[in-house]
Image: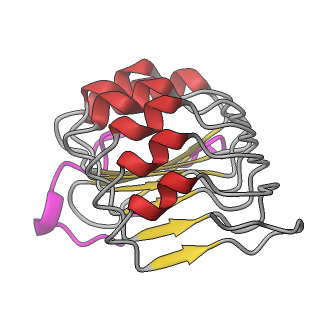
Amino acid sequence: MTEDPFLWHYLYKQEYPWDIPPPTDPRKTFIAKKSYELSVATQRYQELEIALLKHMRYVYNLEIKSQMIRQIPNSIATLKLQSLSVIYTQISKFPIVLSNLSETLRELNMGYNLLSKLPPEIGTLTNLTKLCLNNNSLEELPREIGNLSKLQVLDLFFNKLKSLPPEIGSLTRLETLNTVSYTHLTLP
């Protein structure tokens, strides 16, 4: 087995058992769930960038989890992600680069971050079926949220929302809307 911690869990894909021990460096943790999934917990932005570049043609489901990450690498736009989870980070601005994933991205979890605002570009992610924005500091949602016509699950649990835009009514496939918060929420 290779010593390269970014490559070790992709060498054998499904043919190799997934009980591979993690890298010995405590600053890095890469958890292999199954083929084409990558879970990254790192303290360094540069290591995240390297991991994405090395796996870009293999990764379809990506989880980034680190309290040291403050931004998403632009190289994420080159991936064909179907599912992206960016949780427990220091990200305070929604990464506009994610709008480049509009054709393939189906699930986006940006929970447990420091987001206070969503940009209008969120409306370009029209193939999303699940959007989790729980445990942030969102005060409002942009009207463009109504463009997410395939959305089935919208989790806004524990934010600072006082109201929802009327465009939320155009989400006809929405099955679950979680809006429990600390403040009184007015529905359109």
**Which residue appears at 28% of the width and 61% of the height?**
150
**Quadrant location of the C terminus in the rendered image:** bottom right
Provide the major secondary structure of the magenta segment: loop
Residue depicted at 74% across the width and 60% down the height:
135
Q: Position of residue 100 (x, y in %)?
A: 31, 28
Residue range corresponding to the magenta coloring: 1-28
Residue at left 43%, top 50%?
A: 146
29 displayed left or right of 158: left
Looking at the rendering, which quadrant does residue 71 occupy?
top right
Res. 16 image quadrant: bottom left
Say which of 180 and 9 sits in front.
180
Q: Nearer the viewer, residue 156 or 91?
A: 156
Report whether residue 53 is seen: no
Nearest the viewer among 173 and 5 is 173
Is 87 left, or right, of 62 in this rendering? right
Question: Is 186 above or below relative to 73?
Answer: below
Is residue 20 a member of the stretch shown in magenta?
yes
- What colour scheme was applied to this rendering of the protein? secondary structure
Total residue callouts: 0
Above or below residue 160? Residue 172 is below
**Residue lying furthest left:** 15
* Residue sitting at x 62%, y 46%: 141
Left or right relative to 20: residue 104 = left
Q: Position of residue 174 (x, y in %)?
A: 40, 72
**Per the image, is 116 magenta?**
no
Foreground: 74 or 181?
181
Residue 10 visible, this angle: yes
Q: Is 152 placed above or below 142 here?
A: below
Task: Indicate the position of residue 142 as horizontal and vertical percent values.
Answer: 58, 40
